[in-house]
Image: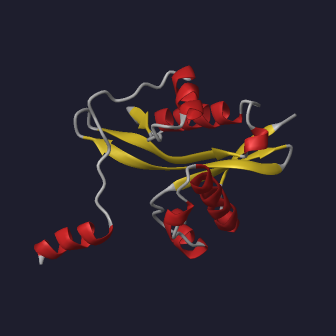
Amino acid sequence: MSLTLRPADEADTGLVLHYIRALAEYEKLLHEVTATEVDLHRLLTGPRPLAEALIAEWEGKPVGFALWFYAVSTFNALPSLYVEDVFVEPEQRGRGIGRAIFAHLAAHALGRGCGRMEWSVLDWNAPSIAFYRSIGARPREGWTLQQLSGPALSALAARES
């Protein structure tokens, strides 16, 4: 049995979109997915990609992915690796693939000089929360994720002009 983690390339945009949709379906958020292959190509390629992705392969067949980007912590003046999505095909879970993905991302974060790795999880997703605790992750007590999008984002931006 063999696991390979490789960087996603331009030919993988359709596969990345497939896994984004599979994750969104699992999270009961498929109705929110508007991304296209063109959007992902623009995000992941070019001279200064805004995000990176990897493909997990088990015995040469795709079984999952991860997508991340970098943020900055002004408190420690270090970059942070923000894990936007990780997904492993349900029938492939339990083989250590998710743990290998997170270990790979942790090593990547340290290699890039990051002071931390962060991600969000839905509060009802008990299996993922248990997995995150098993690898040493802890919730950021006292903090909640805030989001500005759609009409509220446009309305606030209009105040700038």
Residue closer to the observer: 8 or 141: 141
Residue 132 at least partly seen: yes
Q: Is residue 59 left or right of residue 25?
A: right
Residue 113 at least partly seen: no
Vertical side of 146 occupied by 126: above or below: above
- Residue in the image at 24% along x and 67% along y: 152
Residue closer to the observer: 4 or 63: 63
Residue closer to the observer: 99 or 42: 99
- Image spot of residue 110 (x, y percent): 48, 32
Placement of the N terminus among the 4 image quadrants: top right
Vertical side of 154 occupied by 48: above or below: above
Residue 94 appears in which quarter of the rendering? top right
Placement of the C terminus among the 4 image quadrants: bottom left
- Image spot of residue 33 (x, y percent): 53, 65
Q: How many marks?
A: 0
- Residue in the image at 22% along x and 34% along y: 75
Vertical side of 78 occupied by 8: above or below: below
- Image spot of residue 68 (x, y percent): 50, 49
- Residue in the image at 31% along x and 54% along y: 147
- Residue in the image at 40% along x and 32% along y: 116
Residue 13 appears in which quarter of the rendering? bottom right
Q: How is the image coloured?
A: secondary structure
- Image spot of residue 42 (x, y percent): 51, 71
